[in-house]
Image (tube, grey):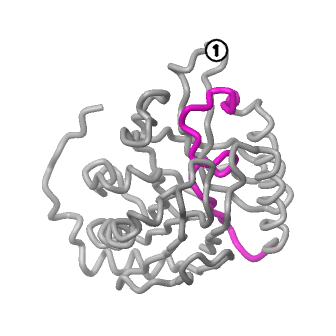
Amino acid sequence: MRVALLQYPIVWADPQANIGLLNERLAAIAGQADIAVVPEMFSTGFCTDRPDLAEPWGSGPTSKALQEMADKYDIAIVGSMIVVEIGTGSTDCLKNRGFMFRPHDEALYCDKRHLYRSGGESEFFLPGNQRDVWEYRGTKIRLAICYDLRFPVWLRQDKNNLYDLLICVACWPSIRINYWDALLPARATENQCYIVGVNPVGIDGMQLEYNGHSAAYGTRLENLAPFEDYEEGTRIVNLSIEKLRYYQEVLPLWQDGDDYEVRR
């Protein structure tokens, strides 16, 4: 499974500009990857108090553009965006929606479960409750959105919820980047999976600074996609799902995990 990590600045509150930037980056890697991962709220930046930026899921211009790019470049696109439930017109029904737009297929989604209270997110968005595992080109995938990374029970692999790859899309500021650096490999080792985390660089409209630190960790916690601090660029990693599943078979740590219940 070839996964592209796209680390770059997001234009604040400008979906059209951000769609154009993504299209340029996808064109540059056409045919080289199966999945492209972009940061959280890739089309707007982390705008938690802008209901005017929300779009209907599937029928809005950003959804349409993402599907067109997935079809054109034969690549699945993973990220998140602000959506509003169709027909409500209420800010109470805004979601930070994680997505996978697949080429010539129906888009998949899950809404961010843990809303970042300190950033005002919980005042405008409703949390999700999906713990779905998506299968794409032979790989089983879970999606986490930024703050979800801090909650291991929510992401815990178990006998009924097995996955190969955990993808985390984020807007994680540089002032707290040490936590990001620690949590990514922690989630990989406790779940015996690959993990890919993508974060932006630059300064947003709230004057928060982002220094990237996107990464992909393998079965031995080696960083397969190291970025320089504040680097703008793309890394493509080739993840061996066969190697991972062999590792899970010969060292089945997940089978010894404690039983638990997630109350949603």
Q: Which residue is nearer to you in this view: 262 or 6?
A: 6
Task: Using the image, determine if residue 85 lies above or below residue 215.
Answer: above
Q: How many marks?
A: 1
Horizontally, residue 139 falls left or right of residue 260, namely: right
- Dot 1: few (<14), some (14–19), or many (≥20) neighbours within 10 Å? few
Relative image position of residue 157 (x, y in whole percent): 31, 57
Q: Residue at x 77, y 55 (%)?
A: 70
Q: Residue at x 55, y 27 (%)?
A: 94
Relative image position of residue 128 (x, y in whole percent): 43, 34
Q: Residue at x 80, y 36 (%)?
A: 61
**Amino acid type at image mark 1:** Gly
Q: Which residue is nearer to you in this view: 128 or 170?
A: 170
Q: Quadrant of residue 74?
A: bottom right
Query: Does dot 1 land on a helix, a strand or a loop?
Result: loop
Q: Which residue is nearer to you in this view: 75 or 252?
A: 75
Relative image position of residue 95 (x, y in whole percent): 54, 32
Horizontally, residue 236 falls left or right of residue 123, namely: right
Give the magenta part as a residue range. Answer: 31-57
Horizontally, residue 169 falls left or right of residue 231, namely: left
Q: Quadrant of the C terminus?
A: top left
Q: Which residue is mark 1?
A: 89
Residue 212 in the magenta stretch? The answer is no
Q: Quadrant of the N terminus?
A: bottom right
